Image (cartoon, rainbow, N blue to C red):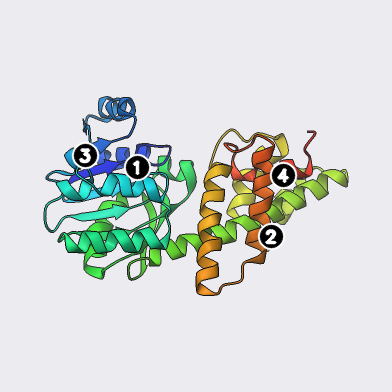
Amino acid sequence: MAKLAFLGLGVMGYPMAGHLKAAGHDVCVYNRTAAKAEAWAKEHGGQAAATPREAAQGAEFVMACVGNDDDLRAVCLGEDGAFAGMSTGACFVDHTTVSAKVTSELYTAASDAGLGFVDAPVSGGQAGAENGVLSVMCGGEESQYNKAEPIMAAYARICRRIGESGAGQMTKMCNQIAIAGLVQGLSEALHFAQCAGLDGRDVVEVISQGAAGSWQMANRHETMLDGAFEHGFAVDWMRKDLGICLSTGDEIGASLPVTALVDQFYKDVQKMGGGRWDTSSLIKRLTPKD
């Protein structure tokens, strides 16, 4: 059993912290909305802290899953930040999807303070977090990863170190780039089937068994056909992630024409009022009156 802190109890962090407690760890949580941290502690029997620093005090590992670069800086740095409360040798594990720039910044700050830092963004969505079957892609020193991997195993289907600091975030960008094209392709295929007078479910049953099959097809085609999008990974967050992908692509000289196009399609969905809809709502652009 390890003494842990978990910062950020959104749709991902809340169940992830729960899996850590269920695995027998001593878990203290922090959330910007204190009532959610208190609710988690009541449900799981852990402790809630008023600040990231308080949550991190005495913890061997501090895990975070917050919103964006600024949110991550806020929970790490400053007088009330987690780094100020962590003991020398403790390890910070960041599950947030953020830019490589802030990862580099915080890795340096952690190293200067005698702390470990592993960037470990996740994929698998809310369902993956709830079921403890996330894909965790990591960057950082091998020794720090080796210490943290058995802890992350509580909510991971696969956990892999890809390389040095920042490699986890770069891998998550690859993940989001791939998803963007897949969802648009699936949206067009289902829209085409509808226009052709075909039963979309029958079509998917057949084509999903061949080269067209994907996680998105298996897990999202029915809700897409039903026009149900009040679940899953929000369009607003996907646009945040794709913005990071496109900015980084410019920096490293990677051409991302499809990603840039789909990002604009998601912008259209936001204009339709779908900022909190699941990313599979791309199909709504094609059938806006449905």
Local packing at callout 1 (Cα closer than 10 Å; few below 14, some 14-19, many 20+) is many
* Secondary-structure class at tag 1: helix
Q: Are marks 3 and 1 in contact (CB under 8 Å)?
A: no
Residue 41 locus on image (x, y percent): 25, 29
Local packing at callout 2 (Cα closer than 10 Å; few below 14, some 14-19, many 20+) is few
- Between 147 and 68, the residue placed more toward the observer is 68
50, above or below 83, in the image: above
Question: Closer to us: mark 2 or mark 4?
Answer: 4
Question: Closer to us: mark 2 or mark 1?
Answer: 1
Q: Amino acid at mark 1?
A: Met
First-in-chain label (4 vs 3):
3
Does residue 26 appear in this view? no
81, above or below 161, in the image: above
Residue to which mark 3 is pinned? 27
Q: Residue at x 58, y 53 (%)?
A: 215
194, above or below 169, in the image: above
Residue to which mark 1 is pinned? 16
Residue to which mark 4 is pinned? 283
State how far apart marks 4 and 3 are (Cα).
Answer: 41 Å
First-in-chain label (3 vs 1):
1
Residue 212 - label: 2
First-in-chain label (2 vs 3):
3
Residue 193 locus on image (x, y percent): 82, 48
State how far apart marks 2 and 3 are (Cα).
Answer: 42 Å
State how far apart marks 4 and 1 are (Cα).
Answer: 30 Å
Does residue 138 appear in this view? yes
Q: Residue at x 62, y 49 (%)?
A: 218
Local packing at callout 3 (Cα closer than 10 Å; few below 14, some 14-19, many 20+) is many
Is 228 on the left-hand or right-hand side of 25? right
The image quarter containing residue 29 is top left
